[in-house]
Image (cartoon, helix red, strand yellow):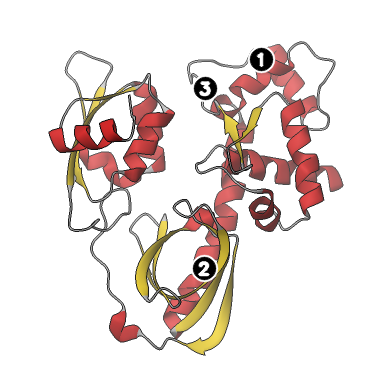
Amino acid sequence: MLNQHKILRVLQLISLLQKEPAKSIRFMSGFIESTERTVYRYLDLIKELGFELERDQNKRYFIKGGLYDETESFTNEEVTLLRELLLSSGKQSKLKDAVLKKIYFKSEIAIHGNHILKAHLGKIVEKISGAIQNEKRVILKDYHSANSQKISDRVVEPITFTDNYNCLIAYEVDSEKNKYFTIERITNVEILEATQEFKYLHNYDKPDVFGFSELNGEKFEVELRLSLLAYLILKEEYPLVEPFLTKEKNKETYVLKCNINNPKAITRFILGLPEDVDVIGSEKYMAFIKSNDVK
């Protein structure tokens, strides 16, 4: 059972580190409910397994090149080795790197790892749903802010979730503002005895397909050409985009055309797959990504 528990935690961290933004040691230790020392040991193991683990300028970790060509598949020899890799680092095997390069597209391990991650997030959503129903305040423990690059507890009055449950819409007591909080960046949730006091200030606009409300009243029309890989990843990460995706005639490419309220999510997506996404529309959005050095 000890080995299995260790495997589950490592899979959780791999799934977590492949998603933006980069994660701090403190955030990861809270996420897997373990010590920072243990997290460092797991990170060493992830590196030994062949993943390109890197740190950003704020000393937060991420896995570089986490998404590989989905056309690659396992050989019979690699499938046999995979069982052994789960119980050891596989240092002496020449097949190790080849197996691990493909693991997140073609193995059941990838599925299990994502399910573990989603199970943890499901518990967070369940707690917040209870607080919404009972009109209670909550503390979002160790919330990882992509904007401020800080990790802190946030006392909020939860209002509702976006359609895809990627974000929580809540009134933040300290800032006195209605905000969107990404579920994956919440380490844990504490439900308070205090009832919601500012319901008359709760307000939110209908979010776009990426879960964002209007940004200073602005909207952006986006038109992208996607490879098959980018198309599949986009649909998986943001299911609400599907009605706005069309396949180009006689080509293996797809086009996304829609209006968005905030360019952050789609810009991060473009930066993550520069060889698989072309921006083909909207002068306003082109000006935005040019000013943000998006190729």
Looking at the image, which residue is at 73% across and 24% down? 82
* Total number of numbered discs in the rendering: 3
Distance from Cα at disc 2 to Cα at disc 3: 33 Å
Residue that numbered label 3 is attached to: 68
Q: Are marks 1 and 3 in contact (CB under 8 Å)?
A: no
Q: Which element type, helix, strand or loop, lies under badge 2?
A: helix
User: Is residue 1 in view from this perspective?
Assistant: no
Q: Earlier in the sequence, mark 2 or mark 3?
A: 3
Q: Amino acid at mark 3?
A: Tyr
The foreground one among 175 and 1 is: 175
Looking at the image, which residue is at 71% across and 54% down? 29
Please provide percent x and percent y for residue 77.
72, 12
Q: Amino acid at mark 2?
A: Glu
Quarter holding the C terminus?
top left
Please provide percent x and percent y for residue 130.
49, 77
Q: Earlier in the sequence, mark 1 or mark 3?
A: 3
Residue that numbered label 1 is attached to: 98
| Res 86 → quadrant | top right
Q: Earlier in the sequence, mark 1 or mark 2?
A: 1
Please provide percent x and percent y for residue 275.
38, 18
Looking at the image, which residue is at 16% across and 29% down? 281
Please provide percent x and percent y for residue 123.
57, 63
Q: Are marks 2 and 3 in contact (CB under 8 Å)?
A: no
Residue that numbered label 2 is attached to: 126
Crowding at label 3, few (<14), some or many (≥20) Cα neighbours within 10 Å? Answer: few
Q: Amino acid at mark 1?
A: Ala
Q: Which element type, helix, strand or loop, lies under badge 3?
A: loop
Q: Is residue 294 above or below residue 7?
A: above
Crowding at label 2, few (<14), some or many (≥20) Cα neighbours within 10 Å? Answer: few
Q: Is residue 166 above or below residue 14?
A: below
Distance from Cα at disc 1 to Cα at disc 2: 39 Å
